[in-house]
């Protein structure tokens, strides 16, 4: 199974992706976590030490350093995964598609989007879960191009802007033929809020409550799953993991 | 067009862009009647020259137009020289203060959710309330700036009359050549509260493979809006752009028009990591770091804040309702902090 997680910046994509990957792994699945943000930081929410997250070499940069582009020569996704991935807790393998800190470490024609497309498209997911935390916004959803067999999670918090982007992401996923689209109402403070968001998105919904423990972990730059796995939001994401794989 | 060497469609587009830059320069020169106007013209020439430098470095993208680019460099340098000659006799102190008083060219960047849009929209409206002409552009395909300015969200991008097709431009579209950039703003921009003029990218379209013409609003709009921003040379207009989150937009040099870059950073560790990664991409600009949503946390290491916008739940509520914070909670200390930032820019206080 492949899962693509999208939404507005700051809506909680990485926090949810990280905790979801951890829960899926705990529930017995083999998990590959794909950080598709050209500002890679999923490692933090997975529980990878901060120094490793800052220094890990994403695939595109490793290829560019070796004098290649994203497609020349074409190296098998599986090989790249073993070569450039890092180990995260609970047997999760984490790999980032690209990291842009200056023009020299991006692909001139696409930034890092082609690597994202290649990876999300080509990594086999028959006996494991490939979970992609996409770049903020809608563009990366187009690049990752999930299909009918994949799951799209559209994450939003309560702001009108965030809900609007999640709504557009749901429509886009429908256009791409994705059959299972789940809206995640993140940091919800009331049932009214969750209901309002559900009506806007018009898809299967899941609610993750507001949780001060998650915010505190985020300030420190540590995984909420390590700070307090029994906090309300982390428990909810455990249920989400079960619901997705059921 | 030069003979004896082959131009790709991309090269042809670049050549046309350069021709249009000269139209902007000539228009500014024809209307220049005072010191600020000549200083603005010099700044515009330098802004184009800086951007030309990035083109010259991209031999792979523009393989054929090298000669034209070198000629363009010399033309722009000619305009800059002429502007300096026009103000040659003016007292250096007067020059310096006039230069600092030119309209702002601000790009706002940061991690998603850091508060870029609230900062840019409130800045724009506060500046407009001081009687300044302000153009605010949303360089984010995820709509937000319109909401925060107090306009309804729209799926429309650049209006039909403001764009035209060109096979060599990215996604096949570019800014119209029928009028100058400032005329495009005056003709087509929406009018937000306090008179702020607004244009955005509009709705992103479904996946389309390869190059060629694409009809989705955002793809039709992006090259046009970036070039529109870069082509506003007027001394009396403030220009503010809210860039899509993260490093891709600075990588694509959406901030090419800017003199000042505002980096918005939240209290979270990842927000600081993002800001530290963004800084090298904009290191050739004057930088202002804004700490947003801080309670009593200290500044992040290496990211000293010029202004701290305090946490205020009323702002979050305004966001929930899709209202402009300036309308929803005008007495918020967060609004007061952004107002101070606007005053710093208006008073030409130099960032530390």
Image (cartoon, grey):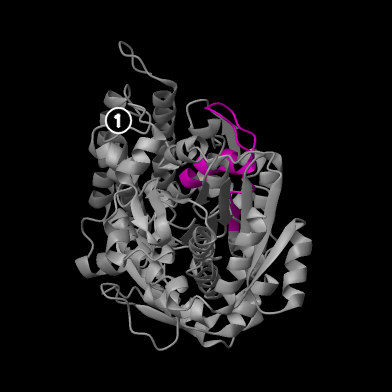
Residue B253 among those drawn in magenta: no
Q: What is the quadrant of the N terminus of chain B in the image?
A: top left
Along the horizontal axis of the image, is A81 left or right of B280? right
Task: Choose between A10 and B196: the one closer to the eye.
Answer: A10
Q: Is residue B176 visible?
A: yes
Along the horizontal axis of the image, is B263 left or right of B156? left
* Residue B49, quarter of picture: top left
The percent coordinates of residue A158 (x first, y second) are 65, 71
Task: Choose between B139 and A182: the one closer to the eye.
Answer: A182
Q: How many marks?
A: 1
Q: Residue at x 21, y 55 (%)?
A: B88
According to the picture, the residue beneath numbered tag 1 turns out to be: B69
* Residue B64, quarter of picture: top left
SS category of the residue bearing label 1: helix
The percent coordinates of residue A144 (x first, y second) are 53, 41
The percent coordinates of residue A33 (x first, y second) are 45, 52
Q: Residue at x 49, y 38 (%)?
A: A117
Q: Residue at x 57, y 49 (%)?
A: A3
Label 1 is found on which chain of the structure? B
**Considering only vertical position in the picture, is B112 above or below B32?**
below
Residues shaded magenta: B198-227
**Considering only vertical position in the picture, is B210 above or below B93?**
above
Q: Is residue A161 visible?
A: no
Along the horizontal axis of the image, is B219 left or right of A79? right
């Amino acid at each position: 199974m492949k899962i693509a997680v999208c939404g507005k910046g700051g809506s909680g994509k990485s926090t949810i992706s990280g905790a979801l990957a951890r829960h899926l792994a705990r529930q017995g699945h083999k998990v590959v976590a794909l950080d598709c943000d050209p500002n890679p930081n999923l490692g933090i929410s997975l529980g990878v030490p901060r120094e490793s997250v800052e220094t890990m070499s994403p695939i595109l940069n490793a290829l560019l350093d070796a004098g290649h582009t994203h497609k020349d020569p074409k190296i098998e996704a599986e090989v790249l995964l073993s070569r450039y991935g890092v180990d995260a807790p609970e047997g999760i393998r984490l790999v980032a598609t690209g990291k842009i800190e200056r023009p020299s470490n991006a692909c001139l024609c696409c930034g890092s989007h082609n690597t994202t497309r290649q990876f999300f498209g080509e990594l086999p997911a028959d006996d494991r879960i490939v979970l992609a935390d996409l770049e903020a916004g809608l563009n990366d959803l187009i690049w990752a191009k999930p299909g009918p067999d994949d799951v799209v999670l559209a994450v939003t918090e309560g702001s009108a802007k965030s809900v609007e982007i999640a709504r557009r992401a749901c429509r886009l996923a429908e256009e791409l033929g994705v059959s299972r689209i789940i809206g995640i109402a993140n940091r919800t403070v009331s049932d009214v809020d969750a209901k309002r968001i559900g009506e806007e998105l018009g898809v299967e919904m899941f609610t993750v409550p507001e949780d001060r423990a998650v915010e505190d972990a985020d300030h420190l730059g540590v995984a909420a799953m390590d700070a307090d796995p029994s906090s309300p939001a982390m428990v909810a994401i455990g249920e989400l993991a079960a619901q997705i794989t059921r | 067009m030069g003979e004896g060497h082959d131009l790709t469609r991309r090269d042809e587009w670049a050549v046309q862009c350069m021709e249009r830059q000269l139209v902007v320069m000539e228009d500014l020169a024809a209307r220049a009647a005072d010191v600020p106007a000549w200083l603005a013209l010099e700044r515009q020439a330098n802004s184009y020259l800086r951007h030309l430098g990035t083109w010259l470095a991209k031999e792979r993208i523009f393989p054929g137009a090298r000669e034209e680019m070198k000629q363009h460099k010399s033309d722009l340098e000619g305009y800059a020289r002429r502007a300096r000659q026009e103000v040659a006799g003016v007292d250096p102190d007067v020059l310096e203060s006039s230069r600092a008083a030119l309209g702002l060219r601000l790009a706002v960047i940061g991690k998603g959710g850091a508060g870029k849009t609230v900062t840019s929209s409130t800045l724009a409206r506060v500046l407009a309330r001081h009687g300044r002409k302000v153009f605010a552009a949303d360089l984010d395909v995820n709509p937000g700036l319109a909401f925060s300015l107090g306009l309804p969200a729209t799926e429309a991008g650049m209006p039909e009359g403001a764009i035209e097709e060109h096979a060599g431009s990215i996604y096949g579209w570019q800014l119209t050549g029928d009028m100058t950039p400032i005329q495009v703003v005056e003709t087509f921009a929406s009018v937000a509260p306090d008179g702020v003029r607004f244009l955005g990218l509009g709705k992103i379209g479904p996946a389309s493979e390869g190059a060629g013409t694409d009809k989705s609003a955002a793809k039709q709009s992006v090259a046009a809006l970036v070039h529109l921003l870069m082509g506003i040379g007027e001394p009396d207009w403030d220009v503010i752009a809210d860039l899509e989150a993260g490093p891709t937009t600075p990588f694509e040099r959406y901030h090419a028009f800017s003199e000042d870059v505002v980096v918005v950073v939240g209290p979270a560790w990842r927000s600081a990591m993002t800001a530290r990664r963004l800084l090298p991409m904009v290191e050739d600009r004057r930088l202002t770091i804004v700490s947003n949503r801080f309670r009593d946390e200290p500044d992040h290491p290496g990211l000293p804040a010029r202004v701290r916008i305090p946490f205020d739940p009323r702002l979050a509520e305004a966001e929930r309702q899709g209202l402009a914070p300036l309308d929803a909670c005008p007495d918020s200390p967060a609004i007061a902090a952004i107002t101070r930032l606007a005053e710093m820019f208006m008073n030409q206080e130099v960032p530390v």
